[in-house]
Every structure is written in structure tokens, then in C-alpha cells.
Image (spheres, rainbow, N blue to C red):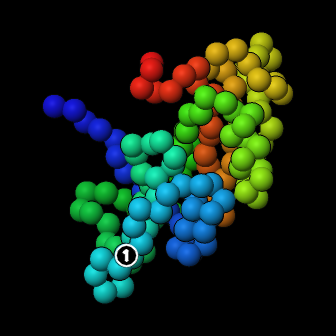
Amino acid sequence: MNWTLEVVPVPVTDMDRAKEFYGDKCGFKIDLDDEVAPGMRIIQATPPGSRCSIAMLSGMPSMPGTRDMAPGSLQGLQLCVTDIEAARAELVDRGVDVTPIRHVGAAGWEDGRGETWNSFMAFEDPDGNGWVVQEAPSELSER
């Protein structure tokens, strides 16, 4: 049996602002924006080419056995791209505040691209949820 990661909840304070950020600024496809029950809204968005989506929820009770996350508390979500410089340029053009491209060197984080699998950048959504983008040598289907 496969255990596929398909949806990651992202805690946000303002659903419309988050939808605009992920849809317009990050270029994620808005798959769903629906009131699933009175006062319960879900927005699901998928990064280009990804099989895993994010879900932003409002008014939904937590599933028993789980804990709520405060907006901005989710850190380290990681996306992979095959051209980090082009990806950074696209995010900057869309108005996202992105860090410079960095790599891990002998003394820690250093500016500029690194070797294979060692080029990164980061950004945050309006609530402070943190994302990392890593350059991969090829598309996932080719690895």
C-alpha cells in the first residue's frame, strides 16, 4: 500500500489574503474555495507540477487526536525546482519577498548556487509560514 502525502494544512489568519498570495503571487492553482458547511471554509491550492496540495481552513474543528497550529507556525515546507534562478525571478516578478540563493559551504550558509542539490532560497507567506525552495537536478518523474 502506498502512503502518499497529498494535502498539507497551512494555518492562516485571512483566507482571502492567503488565497491571493498563494494563487496570484506564488502561482499555485486554486483547486477549491468552498464553504463545506455553514461557517466552514476550505481553500485548496496546488504548486505547479505538484501532486501535493496545501489546504487553508477557516471555522473547521480540529480532528480528534490532533492539535491546532497557530498562523505562521508552519516552517520548512519545501518545494523543489529544476532551475532555482528562474524560479526566484518568477517569484520576485510576482511580488514575493524571496531570500537570495544560498548553499551550504564549509562555514555554513554562503551566498550563491552550490553543487547538485545544494542551492536554496526561502520565503514566507503573509502570516509568516516559512517555505524553502531547493534546486533538484531533474524532475521528480526522472529521478
Q: Is residue 16 left or right of residue 83?
A: left
Q: Residue at x 48, y 42 (%)?
A: 49
| x then y, percent, for residue 126 | 66, 64
At mark 1, the secondary structure is strand
Question: Residue reaching furthest left?
Answer: 1
The residue beneath circle 1 is 34
Q: Residues within 10 Å of mark 1 (few under 14, many from 20)?
A: few
Three-letter amino acid code of the residue under disc 1? Asp
| Residue 5 located left or right of residue 133 | left
In the rendered view, tell whether residue 76 sits above or below residue 128. above
Relative horizontal placement of residue 44, taking residue 113 as reference (left or right): left
Image-quadrant location for residue 111: top right
Question: In this rendering, would 84 be left or right of 34?
Answer: right
Where is residue 86? Give x, y as percent.
Answer: 72, 37
For the question of whether residue 74 can be seen, the reply is: yes
User: Which residue lies most toward the right here?
Assistant: 111
Q: Eyeballing the image, is 134 above or below 118?
A: below
Residue beneath the point at 49% across and 57% down: 29
Q: Nearer the viewer, residue 128 or 44?
A: 44
